[in-house]
């Protein structure tokens, strides 16, 4: 353990800058993205920050000042970043990672600004993911800013007034009906059915200015087969009422209201198109399949908003703590009180480190997920084409076809876990090149990582944001707080809520995390962490691997085990079992992503001469944060698993039938006389008059759970050294150089 | 007439950073300088904006930035600068900061430009009248000397091209006044003060077009060691305690109002 206890290790010299972030998040070769970051940052720390500082958040209305930010987003490339070059954009290839960076940079100052930009992409996303080529061409191009015309802006309208859509997205009150069915001649001449769409929205973002809406509607008209999403334009015939602004307390730089629509549109506005079969309009995609494709991508950006805010809190907090006593005549320069201020107190540095570690872990998780979607996007398209070539065209048929390939996906993952020299080369190569197999693997991973990012980053992030506010003392809850921390804290609650609250993410994970392909992948990750630990023991990777092992053991157990009443434990309506397991998994995934990012920095950093001076200290510090976070994750996982494994067993009581076997005091004395020390092997005794010890009953003993107990004991021992890492990181925190002032107003 | 405009510009630490001199092997440096975010030297930035503006008014003109800086650091700075306006790059990869010798820096830049063998009849060499790091105000004059250009203008705020190819140059002089000179034709060296142009907004699309040309030039940066003809006895922060409030993006009117209020106190 010499490596982790030494005090002569290098310390962090400066707050990690762009070069470090690019290496951690793996975009050092993407100058298009590096530029986008700079451009978005200038808007966030310029006009957005000025508006927040001047009280722009103190109104529910969509004010001219807020509206003036939209052209700023356009000019900085934020709006066009979502489009392909043919549609008026400038980034080639998939855009998930780019979108994630935009959300991160804007939320550094104000998550409402980030939401405003995200909602535009959310509105377009149904069209982008499932629209017909004509729809894509029209709306993506209109929404790409161009000189001399107004940018077409959109809103995504799913949620409805109570009692309709909220978490339950199937409960649609909005309706689409046929308003006019063309005659046969008209049909032959290309005339389409006209639809009447009536929809009320609740909490719809961008409604203050949206020119079009992508709305989810069901149908009660027998001439329409299923629910669908439709595009409504403000100039369409009928009512396009933006509604009154929502009196929200958060994200005030985005516009939210409860709109009402009652409009007539041609059937070609059904997203993804339709067919006419047996005299019925059959939408090619129902609303659920569209929103599923949409949310799985846009949720990642929301998770990263909270991460960004956590990391943005570090510098203002260090400054506040250091400067706390400066300026008083009694505290003179050179004294520890002057130089360190509140940083003299260990709790202050340790709590700040926990915020920092959570920020790093959640950012790593979010960006890992965003990169994964960038990998997945092209595979998804090729997979669809391959399946279509075999006559499989989506829906249940596709689901079944993909399920069949799971065996090969697992075979591939098993081979991947072996040393290269031990793999059957030809077979491995064949599976590596099989797009469908690779898609099945990435898809299974994405189906877990996306909800995990949304759930953990925002949920735990919200908790840690409160810590940040508390470390600013009274200042933390004022409008003057540097870095707008209290706004950022409040805002996290919305990040945890919109695009599906935590329950939605937990529900999704509780299904996707039991996919055998994901579990095969996860088992490989355990070995991966052990390998990292073998060459870099100070990262906490071994602790994490032990926690991952405990989690898989527990999941296997819960899927088979029953509670004391004989009811199956792991089942969809038993959220008390499935949801905490999803939470536990998030901790593990975030910590793993953090460790892998820092490993990458350590490997690639030396190639950048600009980092020569401080790389060692930065890597050491970030590794210490990894170690802290891994231990924290391990603790959470241990707690959750223990609660679930033991919590559903009933505690033995003194009155149970077998309890008569308890030895009496006299029995013990006799035993002791025969074999000295033997009485020590008996746990439970009964005293005179049949009175038991004063406790709930005989202590619970579960020989069947010995494996669990061993894994847990091992895990606890694996915590060794993490507090030393924290102390060392705390030392860095007192030495790190920070800028003289924040680079945005307050 | 289309111009060939060459702009000399180095790097400076981001102005919000805490700067602390520390002794180095050959000369002092700034604490953690390489780890701190950098910017294109503000004076040189003004020169670059003016160059782009002039090039825009004279179709066919080219703008080339010549920069002596650590390559990796320069690359980061270009992520912002290159999205503001179109230009090409010639990078000289070498250490350079506020403690580097102005004479040696000027020589290195001058020689690099001379190697390009630019046609003198339409050459304008721009730069900052001083740097934010060193503030010697000598480099551009040395560059001019190396290139054999006799018309050198310092603390320039404006260039106005006249019909026939001559141009007027406004230089700052004492007492808030300007001196206006007429120069009959290029070549000339213009060392800029702030000029009159605002910082152009970021535009990633421009940046991406630029980077296609800039990245290969950056890869080919010539390693350039700048010798030092000086020795430093000591380097320290000014002893006088200043009451400094650091703010960004405050308008001139607002700053003036604050100063006036402070004077009245
Ligand atoms: C500012 C803001 C902007 C928004 N922008 C948009 C937008 O642009 N477009 C849009 O369509 N919507 C938008 N929304 C709506 C948002 O997505 C919904 O509020 C959210 O999905 C939750 O729905 P609900 O509020 O009806 O909560 P409910 O459905 O009433 O759920 C309340 C709580 O009950 C629990 N719960 C509910 N169902 C379950 C379950 N099955 N299992 C376990 N627990 C459960 C959860 O704890 C949940 O948080 C926005 C909301 C806000 C506040």
Image (cartoon, coloured by chain):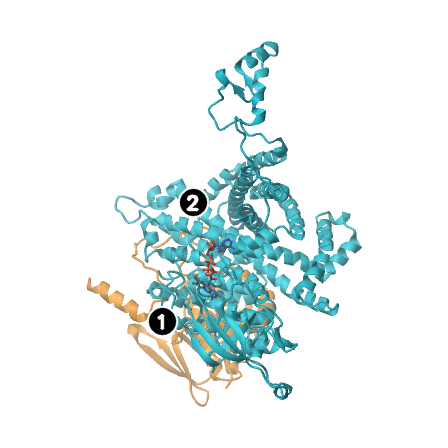
Residue that sits furthest to the top in the current view: A673
Per the rendering, the colour in which chain B appears is orange
Q: Are marks 1 and 2 in contact (CB under 8 Å)?
A: no
Query: Extreme bottom residue here?
Result: B164
SS for callout 1? loop
Colour in which the image shows chain A: cyan
Tag 2, which chain? A
Q: Position of residue A471 (x, y in %)?
A: 37, 48
Q: Is residue A101 left or right of residue B257?
A: right
Query: Label 2: how many residues lie within 10 Å, few (<14), some (14-19) or many (20+)?
Result: some
> Which label is found at residue A351?
2
Q: Quadrant of the C terminus of chain B?
A: bottom left
- Residue A497 shows in the view: yes
Q: Nearer the viewer, mark 1 or mark 2?
A: 1
Chain letter for mark 1: A
Q: CA distance from mark 1 to mark 2?
A: 38 Å
- In this rendering, the answer to whether B189 lies above or below B99 is below
Residue of label 1? A63
Q: Residues within 10 Å of mark 1 (few under 14, many from 20)?
A: some
Residue A110: quarter of image = bottom left
Q: Helix, strand, or loop for circle 2?
A: helix
Please report the residue visible at 41 percent of the width from the left and 48 percent of the height from the top.
Answer: A467
Residue toward you, A440 or A57: A440
């Amino acid at each position: 353990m010499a490596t982790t206890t030494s005090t002569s290790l290098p310390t962090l010299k400066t707050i990690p800058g762009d070069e470090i972030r690019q290496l951690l998040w793996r975009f050092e070769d993407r100058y298009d993205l590096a530029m986008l970051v700079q451009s978005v940052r200038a808007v966030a720390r310029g006009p957005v920050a000025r508006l927040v500082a001047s009280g722009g958040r103190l109104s529910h209305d969509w004010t001219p000042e807020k509206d003036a930010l939209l052209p700023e987003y356009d000019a900085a490339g934020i709006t066009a970043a979502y489009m392909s070059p043919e549609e008026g954009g400038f980034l080639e290839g998939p855009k998930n990672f780019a979108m994630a960076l935009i959300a991160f940079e804007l939320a550094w100052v104000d998550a409402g600004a980030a939401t405003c930009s995200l909602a535009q992409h959310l509105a377009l996303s149904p069209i982008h993911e499932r629209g017909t080529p004509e729809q894509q061409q029209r709306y993506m191009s209109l929404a790409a800013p161009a000189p001399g015309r107004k940018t077409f802006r959109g809103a995504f309208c799913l949620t409805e007034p109570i009692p309709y859509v909220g978490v339950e997205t199937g409960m649609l009150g909005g309706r689409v009906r046929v308003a006019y069915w063309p005659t046969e001649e008209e049909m032959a001449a290309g005339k389409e059915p006209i639809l009447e769409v009536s929809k009320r929205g609740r909490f719809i973002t961008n409604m203050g200015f949206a020119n079009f809406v992508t709305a989810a509607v069901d149908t009660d008209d027998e001439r329409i087969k299923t629910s669908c999403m439709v595009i409504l334009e403000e100039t369409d015939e009928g009512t396009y009422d933006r509604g009154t602004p929502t009196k929200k307390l958060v994200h005030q730089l985005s516009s939210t209201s409860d709109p009402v629509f009652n409009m007539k549109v041609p059937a070609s506005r059904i997203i993804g198109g339709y067919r006419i079969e047996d005299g019925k309009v059959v939408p090619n995609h129902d609303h659920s399949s569209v929103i599923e494709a949409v949310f799985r991508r846009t949720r990642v950006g929301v998770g990263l908003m909270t991460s960004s805010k956590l990391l943005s809190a570090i510098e203002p907090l260090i400054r506040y703590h250091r400067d706390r006593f400066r300026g008083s005549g009694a505290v003179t320069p050179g004294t520890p009180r002057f130089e360190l201020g509140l940083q003299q107190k260990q709790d202050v540095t340790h709590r700040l480190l926990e915020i920092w570690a959570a920020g790093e872990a959640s950012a790593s998780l979010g960006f890992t997920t965003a990169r994964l979607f960038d990998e997945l996007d092209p595979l998804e398209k090729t997979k669809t084409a391959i399946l279509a070539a075999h006559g499989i065209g989506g829906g249940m048929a596709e689901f079944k076809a993909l399920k069949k390939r799971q065996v090969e996906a697992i075979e591939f993952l098993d081979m991947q876990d072996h040393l290269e020299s031990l793999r059957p080369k030809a077979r491995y190569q064949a599976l590596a090149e099989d797009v469908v197999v690779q898609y099945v693997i990435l898809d299974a991973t994405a189906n877990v990582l996306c909800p995990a990012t949304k759930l953990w980053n925002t949920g735990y992030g919200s908790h840690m944001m409160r810590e940040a506010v508390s470390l600013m003392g009274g200042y933390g809850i004022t409008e003057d707080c540097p870095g707008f921390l209290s706004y950022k804290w409040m805002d996290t609650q919305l990040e945890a809520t919109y695009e599906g609250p935590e329950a939605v993410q937990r529900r999704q994970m509780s299904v996707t995390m039991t996919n055998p392909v994901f579990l095969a992948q996860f088992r490989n990750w355990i070995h991966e962490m052990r390998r990292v630990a073998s060459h870099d023991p100070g990262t906490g990777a071994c602790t994490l691997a032990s926690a991952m092992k405990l989690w898989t053991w527990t999941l296997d157990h819960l899927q088979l085990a029953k509670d004391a009443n004989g009811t199956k434990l792991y089942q969809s309506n038993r959220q008390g079992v499935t949801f905490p397991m999803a939470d536990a998994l998030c901790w593990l995934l975030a910590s793993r992503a953090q460790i892998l990012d820092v490993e990458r920095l350590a490997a690639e950093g030396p190639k950048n001469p600009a980092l020569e001076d401080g790389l060692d200290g930065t890597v050491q510090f970030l590794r210490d944060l990894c170690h802290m976070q891994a231990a924290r994750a391990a603790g959470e996982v241990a707690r959750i698993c223990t609660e679930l494994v033991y919590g559903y067993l009933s505690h033995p009581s003194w009155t149970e039938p077998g309890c008569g076997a308890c030895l009496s005091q006299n029995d013990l004395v006799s035993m002791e006389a025969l074999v000295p020390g033997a009485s020590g092997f008996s746990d439970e005794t009964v005293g005179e008059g049949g009175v038991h010890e004063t406790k709930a009953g005989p202590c619970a003993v579960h020989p069947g759970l010995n494996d669990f107990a061993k894994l847990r004991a091992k895990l606890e021992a694996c915590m060794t050294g993490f507090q030393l890492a924290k102390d060392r990181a705390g030392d860095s925190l007192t030495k790190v150089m920070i800028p003289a002032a924040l680079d945005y107003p307050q | 007439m289309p111009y060939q405009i060459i702009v000399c510009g180095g790097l400076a630490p981001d102005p919000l950073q805490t700067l602390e001199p520390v002794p180095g092997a050959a000369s002092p440096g700034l604490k953690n300088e390489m780890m701190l975010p950098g910017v294109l030297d503000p004076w040189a930035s003004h020169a670059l904006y003016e160059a782009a503006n002039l090039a825009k008014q004279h179709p066919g003109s080219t703008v080339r930035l010549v920069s002596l800086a650590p390559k990796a650091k320069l690359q980061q700075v270009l992520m912002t600068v290159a999205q503001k306006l179109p230009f090409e790059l010639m990078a000289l990869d070498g250490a350079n900061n506020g403690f580097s010798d102005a004479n040696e820096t000027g020589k290195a830049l001058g020689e690099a430009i001379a190697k390009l063998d630019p046609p003198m009849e339409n050459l304008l060499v721009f730069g900052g009248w001083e740097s934010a790091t060193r503030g010697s105000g000598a480099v551009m004059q040395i560059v001019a000397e190396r290139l054999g250009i006799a018309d050198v203008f310092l603390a320039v705020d404006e260039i106005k091209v006249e019909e026939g190819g001559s141009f007027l140059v406004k230089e700052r002089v004492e007492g808030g006044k300007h001196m206006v000179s007429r120069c009959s034709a290029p070549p000339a060296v213009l060392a800029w003060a702030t000029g009159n142009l605002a910082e152009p907004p970021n535009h990633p699309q421009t940046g991406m077009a630029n980077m296609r040309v800039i990245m290969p030039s950056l890869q080919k940066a010539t390693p350039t060691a700048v010798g030092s003809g000086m020795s430093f006895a000591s380097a320290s922060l000014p002893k006088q305690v200043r009451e400094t409030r650091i703010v960004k993006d405050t308008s001139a009117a607002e700053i003036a109002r604050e100063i006036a209020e402070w004077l009245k106190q």
